[in-house]
Amino acid sequence: MAQLTYRAAVARAIAQEMRRDDSVVFLGEDVAAAGGVFKATPGLLDEFGAERVRDTPISEQAILGAAMGAAMTGLRPIAEIMFADFFAVAWDIVVNEIAKSRYMTNGQVSFPLVIRSGNGGGLRFGAQHSQSVENWAMAVPGLKVIAPSNPRDVIGLLAAAVRDPDPVLFFEHKALYAAKGEVPDGEIVDELGTARVLRRGRDCTIAALGAMVPRALAAAGQLSSQGIEATVVDVRSLVPLDTATILETVAATGRLFTVEENPRLCGWGAELASIVSEECFHDLDGPIVRITTPHVPLPAADVLEDIALPSVARVVESVRTAVG
């Protein structure tokens, strides 16, 4: 068991899969010699060489077009889009080509590729470099959408994504890159479409994703000192979505709170609220409460950004108010 940072876990996961399978290749802007703008991929060029670890031009269309072509011809590419906001530059390739071509060819062509990107706010990068865009991705049929919250899950879920036959968008939260966690030795492979219950309590369920998971856990700790015991679920996978785990916890606690960094309108919590209200309405003891970022461009000013993003204090106050 070792202590790894979230960013070191990215490099370990990619190396694990490249050692296992010669068809895995890695490409993106400054990912090779520089080790990535967030220093999440150092050492890969030295170990695997320039044929399998490639720096690309500053062009998201080129990166994703090359990854799509590589997947079509039998490779398993991992492509990096530096900031998740930049998916907008190449969204046609993702939405109209990568997500649909396996279906449109009746399975004759498969697309086993992973697109990694730095997602989310909290680092004062401003409105164009701080968006949490997982709700864009989960609205597109044909894409799998993953967002790990800790180093161990980075490795296990990225390995599962590389081995999956379908395209996977893998959102790494920029604010978590320096976070540390215990990671077992040896090969780690997880399962896509599985949530993880991190804490159990009797009074409510708090479902969170990415950087909101440690905030949900911190809030649950504070609530416990006030006599409110919360179950905390790390959603981890939006597509496929582990509804069984979430529904089981809500049926046990009677209340659901979602903690979402994405803007409120059409966020993943709205879909979860819809499913829960349909599947276990009679188990609910109160309305589902969504704790989100407002529907505004994310500010760069530190005070304003902190106000916009869901905080531990806001989660505590929302739960305390609703549960009483």
Image (cartoon, rainbow, N blue to C red):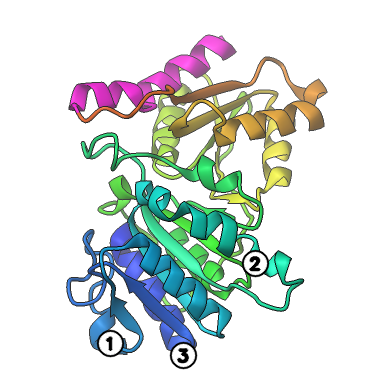
Q: As displayed, is residue 146 above or below residue 156?
A: above
Dot 1 crowding, Cα within 10 Å, few <14, some 14–19, many 20+: some
- Viewer-proximal residue among 155 and 128: 128
Q: Which residues are magenta?
A: 301-324
Name the amino acid type tagged 2: Ser
Query: Residue beneath label 3, please?
Result: 22
- Estimate the spatial distance between the alpha carbons at disc 3 and disc 1, rounded to whole Å: 13 Å
The reply, left or right, for residue 32 in relation to residue 254 is left
User: Where on the picture, by quarter, is residue 226?
Assistant: top left
User: Where on the picture, by quarter, is residue 30?
Assistant: bottom left
Mark carried by residue 50: 1
The residue located at (29%, 34%) in the rendering is 127
Q: Which tag is nearer the camera, tag 3 or tag 2?
A: 2
The verdict on residue 320 being magenta is yes
Dot 3 crowding, Cα within 10 Å, few <14, some 14–19, many 20+: few
The residue located at (47%, 58%) in the rendering is 170
Query: Residue beneath label 2, please?
Result: 101
Identify the mark nearer the N-term, 3 or 2.
Answer: 3
Q: Which tag is nearer the camera, tag 2 or tag 1?
A: 2
Disc 2 element? helix
Q: As displayed, is residue 277 above or below residue 213?
A: above
The residue located at (32%, 88%) in the rendering is 48
Disc 3 element? loop
Identify the mark nearer the N-term, 3 or 1.
Answer: 3
Identify the mark nearer the N-term, 2 or 1.
Answer: 1
Quarter of the picture containing the N terminus is bottom left
Disc 1 element? loop
The verdict on residue 244 being magenta is no
Name the amino acid type tagged 1: Ala
- Estimate the spatial distance between the alpha carbons at disc 2 and disc 1, rounded to whole Å: 29 Å
Residue 305: image location, x then y, percent: 27, 27
